[in-house]
């Protein structure tokens, strides 16, 4: 009887551990739940490739860290605007650095997208808040996250930190539009150097 009780208790603990990680990302302070939990976490992020509980939760952690580092939000560091193109905006500010999310450190690219009638780099530099339409980011996650795209995580935020959505109502966070003819991954796959980053080749796989 005692042996059977121990087996049941062990099984229950394993079930709780899997549930704790089933949203697709690891939390600081959570003990590793073994190989079965890792599989569950992986599946939670792969299906769907973007939007979904795990991807959205990860995007929230990223936004909080970007606010802390003053990369976004009302207290964000100012940058120098330059002329941009669609789909991002006719004026842009790009900032990059290294941040740590859930124990993993990686490169983060933050692109502030500005638009509206009469927008120009000069107008944005004078009053950036007036013209800000969205913030798009790329964060290089841990190896194995998505080898097809050099492990980049993608998200598009509105100025208030909420996630933008596609016409189907899916939140733009994760492997955005992976496999589609249009979208973040399809566009950036054409970047020279194979690192999915335009302008410079700084982030090898």
Image (cartoon, grey):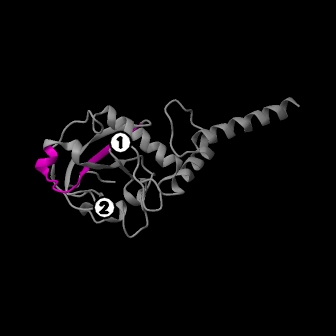
Within-10-Å neighbours for mark 2: few <14, some 14–19, many 20+: some
Q: Position of residue 153 (x, y in %)?
A: 39, 51
For this view, does 32 lie left or right of residue 109?
right
Q: Residue at x 42, y 62 (%)?
A: 177
Horizontal and vertical percent for residue 43?
56, 53
Residue that appears at 45% across and 53% down: 171
Task: Give the distance between the C-alpha atoms of the residues marked 2 and 1, in whole angstroms.
Answer: 25 Å
Q: Secondary structure at mark 2?
A: helix
- Position of 198 relative to 182 (above/below): above
Which circle, 2 or 1, is nearer the viewer? 1
| Whole-percent x, y for residue 69 in the image | 30, 33
Residue drawn 47% across the image and 47% down it: 56
Indicate the position of residue 113 as horizontal and vertical percent values: 25, 51
Q: Are circles 2 and 1 on residues that touch, CB within 8 Å?
A: no
Q: Earlier in the sequence, mark 2 or mark 1?
A: 1
Classify mark 1: residues with Cα within 10 Å, few (<14), some (14-19) or many (20+): few
On whether residue 108 falls in the magenta region, the answer is: yes
Which residue is under mark 2?
Answer: 188
Q: Is residue 155 magenta?
A: no
Label disc, if present, on residue 160 of the rendered structure: 1
Q: Is residue 205 left or right of residue 48?
A: left
Where 26 falls versus 116 (above or below)? above
Residues shaded magenta:
104-125
Image quarter hosting the N terminus: top right
């Amino acid at each position: 009887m005692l042996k059977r009780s121990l087996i049941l208790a062990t099984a229950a603990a394993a079930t709780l551990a899997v549930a704790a990680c089933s949203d697709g990302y690891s939390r600081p302070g959570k003990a590793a739940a073994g190989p079965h939990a890792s599989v569950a976490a992986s599946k939670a992020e792969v299906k769907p490739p973007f939007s979904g509980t795990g991807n959205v939760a990860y995007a929230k952690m990223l936004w909080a860290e970007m606010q802390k580092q003053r990369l976004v939000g009302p207290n964000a560091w100012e940058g120098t605007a330059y002329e941009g193109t669609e789909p991002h905006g006719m004026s842009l500010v790009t900032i990059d650095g290294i941040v740590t999310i859930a124990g993993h450190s990686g490169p983060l690219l933050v692109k502030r997208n500005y638009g509206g009638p009469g927008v120009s780099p000069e107008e944005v530099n004078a009053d950036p808040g007036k013209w800000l339409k969205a913030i798009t980011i790329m964060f290089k996650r841990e190896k194995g996250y998505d080898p097809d795209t050099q492990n980049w995580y993608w998200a598009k935020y509105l100025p208030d930190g909420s996630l933008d959505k596609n016409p189907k109502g899916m939140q733009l966070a994760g492997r955005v539009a992976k496999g589609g003819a249009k979208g973040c991954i399809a566009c950036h796959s054409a970047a020279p150097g194979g690192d999915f980053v335009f302008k410079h080749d700084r982030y090898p796989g």
